[in-house]
């Protein structure tokens, strides 16, 4: 177990800046996920921890040890590769034993440790199989066993679930989470799938274009994104640009053309460290599941929308409206008593959103000061 | 296709009915018959004739005398030749591996300024036909070679410090021309092995030598064994280098030629049979080995990450090695071109030629003797290529798209000439067609113009079959189905979809075959007559008269043609490096 500390780390490939002065520190035994679109620098960051890339600037520490230029084989990290990288000429047993043999352990010890690791990933009985005889899920488990059997200080997972089908991905991510807590290894996980990230992680780092946008718990990341990129990347939200016209002790009032009117937001819902001033530009964020369809008009936080699109997916109805000069999406639960099925395209409806749920994102200039 | 046997009531059906029904049930038997007539008639039958001939003395008696003479310990010339050839082949494997494998690692695994270009340029020896590579080496390192003489001048020595000849000379030329097989096989294996495999091995704590032993070498082994078998087979059959540099050494491939020249056909047949047996064993080994399933990569490939060299010294060393390698590899080509610019008689005692001009190239057109040789080579290669194109395409079509019981026989027979050296193909044709047969329309082929194009054709059928086969294999069957599904009639689909897709592959196969026969030497030297004297023979004559310029000019033309074809077909400097050169 160890703490990984990034100090101002950058990685350039020629003129391309893949990772741009990243600074953060993991906690011991933490499950940390690097989340972002492809090309955002998350895999590059992970590969620097493994030692396959050396940073162009900055230092990397495991606990207090500077490992910036330590060769990969001396770092004691266990990595699960996106394509698993199982050794094709070896059996399952030989694959898992490889790291222990590299550490010159005794045969009996290796036998025991491999058997334990295989039991841990529920692969007992497959020792003598060749790796290409295994299914994708089994290969993934062998890769995991191979990485944890060496008792690494840090476990590195590079999109380990991306080659599995959707159903297997869900059960495997649960298993991964259970296993990580059981072993207590500090884990860095790379994915572009936010659901996967949220369900397994203690903390999530959202990256884009080489820069870190937010480091937070999954809940905080989703509920209180620090900037428009994070909100847009995570989705499930409606964003409208606006300007603060009034503030008082409890609430902030924003005028937005997109929603054709004024929006009142509770101060308790906002990030505590942010201060609000009249006249500054902000984005109003309303999660799609907070937008309600109302039968009678309400005094505030309400607007009229014209239905443009509707889709049924079982639990919910996905609806899209035109409001003011923008569009907004709503996800409303399917209930027998509600009559969304009868709505037709072009219907005019009243939409409202609770005061306590309206979240404001600071404009770009000011959000940099805050973070 | 299983069709029920016709029920025979009472007495048995007449034999011809049984035979007719048998053919109906197995239509591939008669559909492939013309191909087998060619394969058996011109490839297998001559080989067997040679084998039978080896059991007859020159007086026509059936006996084992030839073999007794071959393995005679009291007059061990032949045994000596056998062991020299085997030793040379083994040494060639080691030398070619020693150059090819490290270069492949250097260029494939590491990134340094220029590594991309170097990795493409390293295959330049591929542009040499065997005879021309020996020629270039003689110009460069031979008795009057530029390098030994240059060193002699530079240090004021009494005689050149070294001269390329004998076994070491042959070995160096073999290493130069054959390291490519190790280079391509190794770099193909390295790039096929997912980079993440090596990263996983490092991540789990394996040091350099541990990874080498447990991961890298085991994964490379199949490719290296394949390359070793191939180089051994090529080296034991090599003719040009032993012929020009062998001196007093004896080699099996040379002995066949010497026996034939001495008129001892019985001994030539015996030596050819023994050499053919060795070659066929290696052909079967290579075929068997390539069918052993090599390691399958599991999981999807992700982008390849190349190791960065951090240490600046390592980068410089890598660059210096690359530059030295490239200079050494391209010097023969440069020398050949330089010599081709030297008019005959102007270069006598000087280290470097004093006069340069295009006169030798003009001579190729004006001098009737040279022009005839060039014309002969081009004509005969074209005839052979056209013939081989038709045959090879049909064979490839059957091998790729049809299932039939005799498939293996067709495959082995087609590949047979690939393994046999030109000497043996020539001896076989001589022995089989020195009397009228229906295969040759009751003519004696030996001593006529047509025996040489036939030898070329036999030699390149495997080459063309292989490239057309690859094209057919790559052709997605669903393309044709999609074309039919969208309403195209069979010929429309062929014209609009199949033909455009297979044309580039077939054309590149034909071009490769064409240029590989233009400089053919080994069969030519045994079969040519006054009427069809090819370029390689004229080169030899010019060399013997010390007319280096015209010889080099003809060599340069061959090199340029081959280079052009290789570039057009993307084998040289192309993205994918295909396995090996065009001679095998």
Image: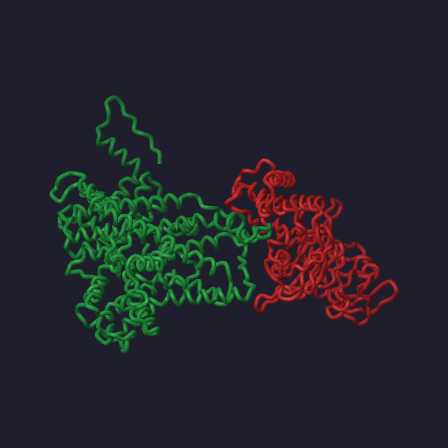
Task: Point out residue A323 in the picture as x, y percentages from the top left corner.
Answer: 72, 62
Quarter the C terminus of chain B occupies: bottom left
Taking the image as drawn, is residue A164 in sight?
Answer: no
In the orientation shown, which residue stands out farthest toward the left?
B59
* Numbered marks: total: 0
Q: Please tell me whether residue B67 is drawn above or below residue B503 in the rendered image.
A: above
- Left or right: B194, with A308 as reference point: left
Task: Point out residue B423 in the picture as x, y percentages from the top left corner.
Answer: 23, 52
The scheme the figure's colours follow is: by chain
In the orientation shown, which residue stands out farthest toward the top?
B10
Task: Point out residue A355 in the picture as x, y percentages from the top left corner.
Answer: 82, 59
- Left or right: A187, with B56 as reference point: right
Residue occupying the point 45% across, 58% down? B102
Residue B419 vs residue B372, the one in the foreground: B419
Residue A182 vs residue B571, the one in the foreground: A182
Residue A11 vs residue B3, the one in the foreground: A11
Task: Point out residue B75 in the picture as x, y percentages from the top left corner.
Answer: 20, 46
Which chain, by letter, is red?
A
Residue B78 vs residue A116, the one in the foreground: B78
Taking the image as drawn, is residue B293 in sight?
Answer: yes
Quarter the N terminus of chain B occupies: top left
Chain B, colour shown: green
In the orientation shown, which residue stands out farthest toward the front?
B158
Q: Please tell me whether residue B381 is drawn above or below residue A175 in the rendered image.
A: below
Residue occupying the point 19% across, 55% down? B526
């Amino acid at each position: 177990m160890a703490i990984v500390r990034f100090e101002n780390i950058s990685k350039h490939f020629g003129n391309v800046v893949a990772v741009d002065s990243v600074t953060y520190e993991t906690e011991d035994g933490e499950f940390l996920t690097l989340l972002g679109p492809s090309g955002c620098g998350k895999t590059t960051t992970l590969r620097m921890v493994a030692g396959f890339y050396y940073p162009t600037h900055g230092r990397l520490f495991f606990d207090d040890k500077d490992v910036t230029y330590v060769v990969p084989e001396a770092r004691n990290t266990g990595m699960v590769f996106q394509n698993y990288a199982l050794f094709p000429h070896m059996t399952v047993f030989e694959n898992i034993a490889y790291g222990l043999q590299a550490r010159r352990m005794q045969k009996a010890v290796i036998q025991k440790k491999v058997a334990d690791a295989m039991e841990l990933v529920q692969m007992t009985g497959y020792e003598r199989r060749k790796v290409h005889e295994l299914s994708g899920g089994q290969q993934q488990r062998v890769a995991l066993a191979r990485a944890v059997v060496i008792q690494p200080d840090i476990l590195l997972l590079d999109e380990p679930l991306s080659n599995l089908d959707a159903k297997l991905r869900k059960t495997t991510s649960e298993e991964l989470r259970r296993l990580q807590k059981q072993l207590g290894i500090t884990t860095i996980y790379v994915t572009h799938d936010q659901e996967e990230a949220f369900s397994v992680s203690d903390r999530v780092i959202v990256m884009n274009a080489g820069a870190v946008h937010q480091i937070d718990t999954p809940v905080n990341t989703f509920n209180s994104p620090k900037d428009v990129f994070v909100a847009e990347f995570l989705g499930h939200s409606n964003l409208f640009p606006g300007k603060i016209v009034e503030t008082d002790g409890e609430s902030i009032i924003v005028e937005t053309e997109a929603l054709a009117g004024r929006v009142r937001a509770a101060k308790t819902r906002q990030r505590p460290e942010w201060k609000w001033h009249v006249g500054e530009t902000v984005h109003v964020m309303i999660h799609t599941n907070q937008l309600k369809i109302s039968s009678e008009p309400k005094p505030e936080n309400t607007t009229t929308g014209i239905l443009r699109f509707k889709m049924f997916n079982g639990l919910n109805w996905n609806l899209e409206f035109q409001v003011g000069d923008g569009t907004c999406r709503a996800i409303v639960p399917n209930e027998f008593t509600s009559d969304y099925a009868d709505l037709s395209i072009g219907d005019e409806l009243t939409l409202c959103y609770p005061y306590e749920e309206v979240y404001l994102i600071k404009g770009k200039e000011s959000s940099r000061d805050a973070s | 296709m299983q069709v029920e046997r016709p029920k025979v009531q009472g007495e048995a059906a007449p034999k011809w009915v049984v035979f007719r029904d048998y053919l109906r049930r197995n239509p591939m038997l008669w559909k492939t018959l013309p191909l087998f007539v060619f394969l058996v008639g011109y490839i297998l039958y001559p080989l067997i004739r040679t084998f039978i001939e080896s059991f007859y003395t020159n007086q026509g008696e059936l006996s084992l005398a030839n073999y007794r003479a071959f393995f005679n310990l009291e007059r061990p010339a032949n045994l000596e030749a056998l062991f020299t050839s085997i030793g040379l082949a083994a040494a060639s494997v080691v030398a070619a591996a020693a150059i090819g494998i490290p270069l492949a690692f250097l260029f494939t695994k590491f990134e340094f300024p220029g590594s991309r270009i170097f990795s493409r340029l390293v295959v330049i020896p591929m542009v040499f036909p065997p005879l021309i590579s020996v020629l270039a080496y003689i110009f460069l390192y031979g008795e009057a070679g530029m390098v030994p003489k240059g060193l002699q001048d530079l240090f004021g020595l009494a005689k050149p410090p070294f001269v390329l000849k004998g076994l070491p000379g042959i070995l160096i030329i073999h290493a130069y021309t054959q390291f490519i097989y190790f280079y391509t096989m190794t770099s193909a294996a390295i790039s096929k092995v997912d980079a993440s495999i090596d990263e996983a091995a490092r991540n789990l704590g394996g040091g350099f030598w541990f990874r080498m032993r447990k991961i890298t070498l085991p994964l490379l082994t199949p490719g290296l064994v394949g390359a070793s078998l191939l180089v051994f087979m090529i080296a034991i059959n090599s003719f040009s280098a032993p012929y020009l540099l062998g001196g007093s050494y004896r080699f099996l491939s040379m002995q066949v030629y010497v026996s034939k020249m001495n008129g001892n056909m019985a001994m030539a047949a015996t030596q050819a049979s023994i050499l053919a047996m060795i070659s066929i064993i290696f052909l079967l080994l290579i075929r068997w080995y390539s069918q052993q399933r090599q390691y399958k990569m599991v999981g999807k490939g992700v982008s390849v990450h190349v190791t960065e060299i951090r240490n600046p010294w390592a980068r410089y060393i890598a660059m210096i090695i690359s530059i030295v390698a490239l200079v050494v590899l391209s010097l023969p080509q440069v020398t050949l071109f330089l010599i081709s610019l030297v008019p005959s008689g102007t270069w006598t005692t000087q280290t470097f030629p004093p006069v340069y001009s295009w006169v030798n190239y003009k001579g190729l057109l004006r001098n009737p003797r040279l022009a005839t040789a060039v014309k002969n080579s081009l004509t005969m290669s074209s005839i052979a290529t056209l013939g081989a194109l038709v045959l090879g395409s049909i064979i490839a079509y059957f091998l790729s798209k049809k299932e039939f019981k005799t498939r293996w026989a067709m495959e082995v027979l087609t590949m047979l000439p690939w393994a046999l050296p030109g000497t043996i193909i020539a001896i076989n044709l001589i022995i089989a067609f020195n009397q009228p047969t229906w295969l040759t329309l009751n003519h004696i082929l030996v001593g006529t113009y047509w025996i040489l194009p036939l030898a070329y054709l036999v030699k390149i059928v495997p080459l063309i079959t292989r490239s057309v086969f690859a094209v057919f294999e790559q052709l997605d069957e669903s393309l044709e189905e999609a074309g039919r599904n969208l309403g195209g009639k069979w010929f429309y689909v062929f014209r609009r979809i199949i033909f455009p897709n297979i044309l580039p592959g077939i054309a590149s196969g034909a071009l490769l075959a064409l240029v590989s026969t233009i400089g053919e030497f080994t069969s030519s030297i045994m079969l040519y007559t006054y009427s069809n004297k090819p370029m390689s023979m004229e080169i030899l004559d010019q060399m013997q008269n010390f007319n280096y310029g015209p010889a080099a000019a003809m060599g340069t033309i061959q090199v340029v043609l081959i280079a052009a074809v290789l570039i057009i077909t993307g084998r040289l400097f192309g993205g994918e490096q295909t396995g090996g050169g065009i001679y095998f």
